[in-house]
Amino acid sequence: MVVCRKKQKQCLSNEREVGDCWIGVSLADSSGLILAARVGKPTDALIEELVVSSEGKTDCLQWNSDDWGGYERVLPPEILHYIGKDKTQRLERTNGIVRQQTGRWHRRQNKARQSVGTNEGTTRLVVSYFNWIWLHSRSKTTAAQRAALALRPWTWHDLLTYPTTI
């Protein structure tokens, strides 16, 4: 999924070295919980990181994706892989929601640098917000509630003070 990208001809010479910044997202189909997100150049290594970081979070053996060939090269043979827009509607809708909530991706201004490090931090924050705080307009629940990981929507205080390990 391309979230933050500008034409190469509009880039400054030092920005061309950074290149396009893609965000790969894996989504639990039943709850809509974002399982993992990875930021980087559109390479097989990015998809491999996404697959590895998604393993063990669900026992689903099915991946739905767009028609980029990296998935076919990286996904293990025991995973069923379906390709097509009809299979990725929920993921694209989630991507749109996340992009609308994130000004640096929504505006796509030249001022929003293509720094992978900055985008990784932003992505972590937005994914946490989406999973734990953001209420779906129809169900009035968070993705974490639908996945039975939370009893109520979290607040920013809950999110920022939750004990984590690095």
Image (cartoon, rainbow, N blue to C red):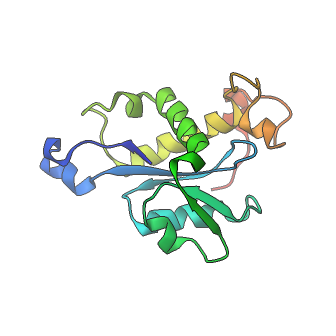
Q: Residue at x 77, y 63 (%)?
A: 59
Would residue 32 be found to the left or right of residue 85 on screen?
A: right
- Residue 21 percent across, percent down from the top left: 36, 50
* Quadrant in the picture for residue 125: top right
Up the image or down, 53 lies above or below 75; here it is above
Q: Position of residue 37 (x, y in %)?
A: 55, 51
Tell whether 73 sits left or right of 114.
right
Q: Residue at x 67, y 75 (%)?
A: 78
* Count of numbered tags: 0
Q: Nearer the viewer, residue 77 or 26?
A: 77
Left or right placement of residue 42 versus residue 97 in this view: left
Q: Where in the figure is residue 24, as x and y percent of width and height?
A: 49, 53
Image height of 65 relative to 80, above or below:
above
Q: Which residue occupies the extreme bottom position in the image?
A: 77
- Give residue 159's quadrant in the image: top right
Q: Residue at horizontal 24%, vertical 34%?
A: 110
Identify which residue, 139 or 57, lies in the foreground: 139
Which residue does the image show at 73% across and 45% down from the upper left? Answer: 163
Q: Nearer the viewer, residue 160 or 142?
A: 142
Residue 48 vertical position relative to residue 33 in the rendered view, above or below: below
Q: Dividing the image into 4 quarters, which one contains the C terminus?
A: bottom right
